Amino acid sequence: MTDNHAMKQGAPQVTSSMISSETSYTLDCDVNGEPVSMKVQPSRRLLFILRDDLQLTGTKRSCEIGRCGACMVLMDGKPVNACLTMAYQCAGKKITSIEGLSGRGVHPIQQAFLDEGGFQCGYCTPGMVISTKALLDDNPRPCKAEVEEALSGNLCRCTGYGGILRAVYKAIETADG
Amino acid sequence: MLLNRETSGKRWRTRPDGEEKVTGKLVYLTDMSASGMLFGNVLRSAFAHARIIKLCTDKAMALPGVHAVLTFEDIPGLNGFGIAKPNQPVFCEDRVRYVGDAVAAVAADSEELADQALKLIEVEYEALPVIDDPEQALAEDAMLLHPEGNLLHRAEYRRGDTAAAFDDCVHIVEETYFTPRQMHTYMETEGGLFIPGENGRITVYSATQHGLMDRLQLSRITGLPESDIRVISSPIGGSFGGKDELNVQPYGVLLALRTGRPVKLHNSRKESVRAGIKRHPMKITMKTGVNREGKLLAHQVRIVADTGAYATLGAEVLNFALEHAVSGYRFENVEAQGYSVYTNNGVSGEFRGFGGNQAIFALEGQMDRLAELLGMDPWTFRALNLRQIGDPGPLGQRIAQTDGAKQVWEVLAQSPLWMERSGPSGETHEPWIRTGIGAALAMHGAGLGFGIPDPGAGRLALAADGKIEAIFGYEEFGQGLIATLEQMLIEQFGFATEDLRIVIGDTDVVPDSGSSTASRATSMMWTALRNMRPAFTKLLVEKAAALTGTPYEQLELGAGGIRNKAGVLLLTFEQLASAAGEPLAVKTEFHYPVTPDKRVGAHFLYTYAAVAVKVEVNTLTGRVKVVDQYHAVAAGPVVNPQGFLGQIEGGSGMALGFTLSEDAFMNSGRYGVNNLDTYLIPTVTDLNGSVTVVPIETLPEGDIYGPRGVGEIGSVALAPAITSAVHHAVGKRIAKLPIEPHLLQEAPFAQKKEVSGA
């Protein structure tokens, strides 16, 4: 129940000066092997730098609070949620997005996802592939618990994870073979 | 035979849309942008229920960089949408009925400016009492949410004399079941790009499950003829029924038409939770009785569904739930009533399973409870009452007969997992972990049902460039529809992958194949190809015979072109297309098969599933872990093994969330969750158990309906199987989902006896 009273929506005191995009900050980093130098707000999130400023839309926007992993990218080889990473945190770093992984054809991890059907709608897939890449670079022969921990920050709503787990084990096997 | 990559052999194919998906190159409609585009956003209600006293957009409009601020006054046509009943306002005029109600929309140079403009829109409300419970909404003195009252729809079905039959029962179980407000949680939230074109046309790039329905609804809202609206609607990052209804499209279209510029909208997750439809929370009371031998004599059902503020498909979901609440078994005497009720809660609508999930959870719960009273094995008890081939459908209607119910029952009875149940109970690694095995069974209708337009259509053409085009009005939201269509074309016609071009999701070119919903698209594509195959083959082969001089009888369609019976390629499709000089095309139009009996919504095609699960109940935390699943599914021939497996695994994963963790709960009309930190869908650690899928492909001789769709059947029987297994593990009956852990917690080291006295 709510009180039976009048209430106003709207805040007339907000002015356009609060949303100025003027900035003197220059971000210098490496994205998928290419040097990037751009003027951005130091707090601009990497997700939007990639998607909107650099048109790298393989990194997906979904929860924007670091729970779903759809925007997972590698920063100096470690997986990070691009939605929780600000421009200033990227200074001098090597950022690898899904486009960087597949730049030279289909990566063996991606091939494993293809072979095993480790995707359906595909929206979580770039993030899944990136998390798998981070895991296998760090630990080429992970046990079941390590695989699950590495992927527990990536949500998939389509597959029930069956195909994804088969793809990851296939990727481990392929690398071993 | 169990289904996996090995057992599927060469029929396990790489999806045609796979490479673009795993490489991130696929451009979803929310990834699109256009030069000069504006960013749109929608102002939604501050209240769950209120009158709008004043609405002023002047300050928002005065903000530099804002190009349009629209309200109800700016709608050229109908201020309403809804697939079955368009009573949800595009923009509220004088009253808001839920927190997702739209009041205004803006288009601005940037997302930040659009957000600021929303804050400058002044709305004065007078709060009204919030009706947040359907029973409260049905009270005589309840405030009316709609002119026709608070009851969207009442459904009823009776046969026999239940009152008399209950008198003859030896055991009667009466229980009330509750199911949650499940959220679809597609990973891609709603959004798209809206581009005004020349001559007043507009192109909509936004996800839906039925482009032509969106076109119709947008035509009503804008007043534009349908031919001036082009809806491009695939690929889609998940839908599960949730994107079938309009969401951002009316705002994108109206803003683009007003500004004459491309407009992009893409809901934040919070916006998606707040405005989007959910699965209907239902309260289902069942009273079911048996005689001494265990024969079901009487079954009484009362369903109350919270349909939220507006109609969309609330009536149809209720009809489906009612039908499935009395399905699968031989009940002589049935009395079922259902109520779909408006409240000030979020709008409930279409969601994979379509009301079957709720009904089957309750129905199977009754079966387990009755078996226990009879002292019978629950699976044996089911066999005693299971429907048989030749029996009418749940509502007494004639249906396409299969032996699916018995088939799935038998396969499950012989499964290793079910046999393990009667063996010695396994060692538990920890004394506070208890294991249990349970099972449930379901029959599930497909198609929209009697009395509802349910068209099927398709076209095949040899295009000028020599590609074989298959053109259907369906959508690809992840289920693998393109892959399934490709596999059917290859296996039935002998085409090669590279011969094909599949065209879907564009209202300017597709026929009205109906909606990609209700587990119908696979069977409709199969029927369409079967209808077109003779004519298309004849058309191409006759032309080739004339061109090559080879007799018609010696030619056939094959990979790459027309071949002789020895398999030698005589004419490529490209050569045939250029020599033909005219389009070689055939089309088919038909209707989804329906029962001849006049019962609105009653189904004709059904699939069957039996599911067994093994759970571990942690009695310290009260958490349930599903460690093994076994699914027997009778849905006719498997047309796409990878797709079939994925649908059953994925559908059951979604059902696991429905059972164990998911509820977009509301309090006084406000959501208690707003993102994926509080709304918990299963992660890989929740779904790391074994899943075995066993398709039963045989159909009765003479069946002309072929493969049935499996988009939903994997999601409807898991919940009752889990609660059955929980009972097997700890002896507790669960009637409310998601399972509340505290009900399963046991105080460690505490004395089990009650503390007496006050």
Image (tube, rainbow, N blue to C red):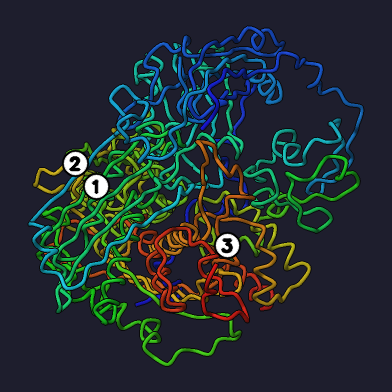
Amino acid type, mark 3: Phe
Q: Residues within 10 Å of mark 2 (few under 14, many from 20)?
A: some
Residue under label 1: B528
Label 2 close to label 1 by CB (< 8 Å): yes
Q: Nearer the viewer, residue B141 or B692?
A: B141
Label 2, on which residue? B590
Whether the residues at callouts 3 and 1 have beta carbons within 8 Å, the answer is no
- Residue B626, position in %: x, y? 50, 71
Q: Position of residue A72 (x, y in %)?
A: 70, 52
The crowd level at tag 3 (other Cα within 10 Å; few <14, some 14-19, many 20+) is: many
Of the numbered discs in the image, which one, if any, rests on residue A113?
3
Q: Amino acid at mark 2?
A: Phe
Residue at the limit of the structure toward the front, as seen here: B757
| Quadrant position of the C terminus of chain B in the picture | bottom right
Q: Where, by quadrant of the figure, is residue B97 drawn?
A: top left
To which chain does the residue with label 2 belong? B
- Image mark 1: chain: B
